[in-house]
Image (spheres, rainbow, N blue to C red):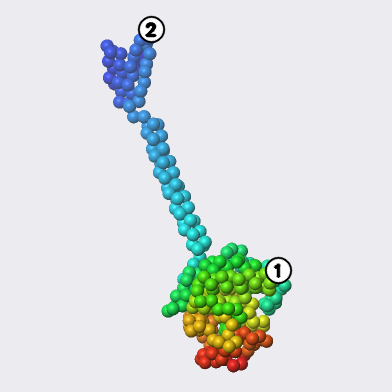
Amino acid sequence: MIGVNSDNFNVLQGKYTSNNVNCQCDKSQSGIAELNFSEENDDHSYSTQLFCKKIKILLYFITAGLLMAILLFTIRTMITVQNIDMLVRLHYKIHKVTPNPLMESMSESSPEYVSITEAIPTTAIVRREALQIVPREQWNAAFPKDVIKLIGPVDIIIICHTATQNCNTSTACEKLIKSMQRYHMEEQRWWDIGYNFIVGGDGKVYEGRGWTGVGSHTFGYNRKSLGIAITGDFKTKIPYKAQIKACKELIKMGVMLGYIDKNYKLFGASQLVSTLSPGKALLEEMETWPEFSEKA
């Protein structure tokens, strides 16, 4: 006997119907009645579907977060690699290393030597009126062996000449400056080309050690000055007008950017050390510049 309480029971069809369960009574081949149950509202199945939806949503947010992190990392890497400072503010990533004075005979000894661990960041060609600054990679500069950081702003500007033939095209100037760097590094055993900047006969300024690197141009003054070389030999003749103009504009830019003290003093190298540089003719020309100083 089966107790059915108040639920509907269809004896003729062998079916039992309740609020939540259908029960069908069939006869098997053995003649014994079998009961088949099926739930109309399967709570377990519904919970499983809901859980799967939540997992899908969670995975979506995790994927979106990872993609965003990769994008941000890529952008940051690109900025780090380029590291272009449109105001010519060169930034060197440096670490202390053991001093090696033999590698830089023209620099003053210092307990704090620094080594570049990455390629020197370059600057785009920067214009101030007619001024053009050509970055190192454009003239194919070799990577320096080491760098001493120049603490600025400096209050001394020293003008030199290269004591070579002058150049009047960009191709000729780049070739000349590259040859000069090779001589300084291989023959003089300096860490890099000796000058902070070189003014070519084409009227462009070529980046040497830049605003923040100690040069090797005037012994005893390298750590407190900027050395600017003008291509050519000026014992008997002065530089091209474009060279003089570019040199003056470069100094003005240095003052504007804070690398050169506004009350700086201007010297020819021969005023400070025993040398013919920058040549008698150029030194006489410099005496007409308002910032020229007769005494150190």
Which image quadrant for residue 150?
Answer: bottom right
Say which of 59 and 145 sits in front.
145
* Residue denoted by label 2: 29
Labels 1 & 2 near each other (Cβ < 8 A): no
In the figure, 16 relative to 229: above or below?
Answer: above
| Image quadrant occupied by the C terminus | bottom right
* Residue denoted by label 1: 98
Gap between marks 1 and 2 measured at Cα: 97 Å
Instruction: Indicate left or right for 48 with 282 as reference.
Output: left
Q: Position of residue 104 (x, y in %)?
A: 68, 73
Say which of 18 and 22 sits in front.
22
Residue at image coords 49%, 67%? 84
Question: Secondary structure beneath disc 2?
Answer: loop
Which image quadrant for residue 214?
Answer: bottom right
Say which of 98 and 27 sits in front.
98
Residue at image coords 51%, 76%? 168
Amino acid type shown at disc 2: Gln
Residue 267 appears in the picture as rendered: no
